[in-house]
Amino acid sequence: MTRHLARNTRSPLAHAIGLGSTRSGVAHWWALRVSAIALVPLTLWFAAALILHTGSSHAEFTAWLRLPRNTIAMVLLVVAAFHHTGLGVQVVIEDYMHSTARFAALVLLRLGCIALALAGSLATLAIAFNG
């Protein structure tokens, strides 16, 4: 009975298209999964790089980071990590905050993740191009 009532509250267009009330749940779910899949090889690459460079000097590590494939992989890791973090924490905020502070928390989360991803990417690029 409840399921039937829920269907009747949706607009005919939403019912025909099959969209729920938010219209972004599936996209958010896919973005979270895709970023998680992207993080698997990037994190393994980073962990292996840290293990291989244990005990190396600063000059050796920066020379390694200056290689284009390593610079690109590091920037991708930083961006994917903060994108994934933002998506995951957004779900927690939306599920557990039910006040007017929810909007402010989501804005601060988004701005914080963007700022940290930008800072990490710029730091990587600065090391890669300036040493």
Image (cartoon, rainbow, N blue to C red):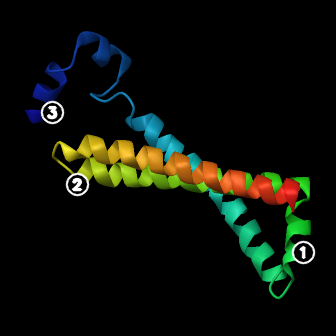
Point 76% across, 77% down: residue: 50
| Residue 73 seen in this snapshot | no
Picture coordinates of residue 56 (x, y %)?
Answer: 86, 84
Q: Which residue is identified by label 1?
A: 59
Instruction: Find residue 126 and name its label.
Output: none
Picture coordinates of residue 7 (x, y %)?
Answer: 18, 24
- Check disc 2 and give the amino acid type: Tyr
In the rendered structure, the answer to whether residue 108 lies left or right of residue 124 reads left
Residue farthest along the bottom direction in this orientation: 55
Query: For numbered disc 1, what is the local secondary structure?
Result: helix
Instruction: Find residue 96 and name its label.
Output: 2
Q: Which residue is identified by label 3?
A: 3
Closer to us: 10 or 35? 35
46, above or below 110, in the image: below
* Foreground: disc 1 or disc 3: 1
User: Within 10 Å of the Cα at label 1, are there few (<14), some (14-19), or many (20+) other Cα atoms?
Assistant: few
Query: Closer to the N terminus: mark 1 or mark 2?
Result: 1
Q: Quadrant of the N terminus?
A: top left
User: Do the CB atoms of the residues marked 1 and 3 lie less than 8 Å apart?
Assistant: no
Q: CA distance from mark 1 to mark 3?
A: 64 Å
Which image quarter: residue 124?
A: bottom right
Picture coordinates of residue 68 (x, y %)?
Answer: 89, 53
Q: CA distance from mark 3 to mark 2?
A: 25 Å
Which image quarter: residue 12?
A: top left
Query: For numbered disc 3, what is the local secondary structure?
Result: helix
- Check disc 3 and give the amino acid type: Arg
40, above or below 118, in the image: below
In the rendered structure, the answer to whether residue 33 lies left or right of residue 125 reads left
26, above or below 119, in the image: above
Point 40% across, 49% down: residue: 109
Residue farthest along the top direction in this orientation: 12
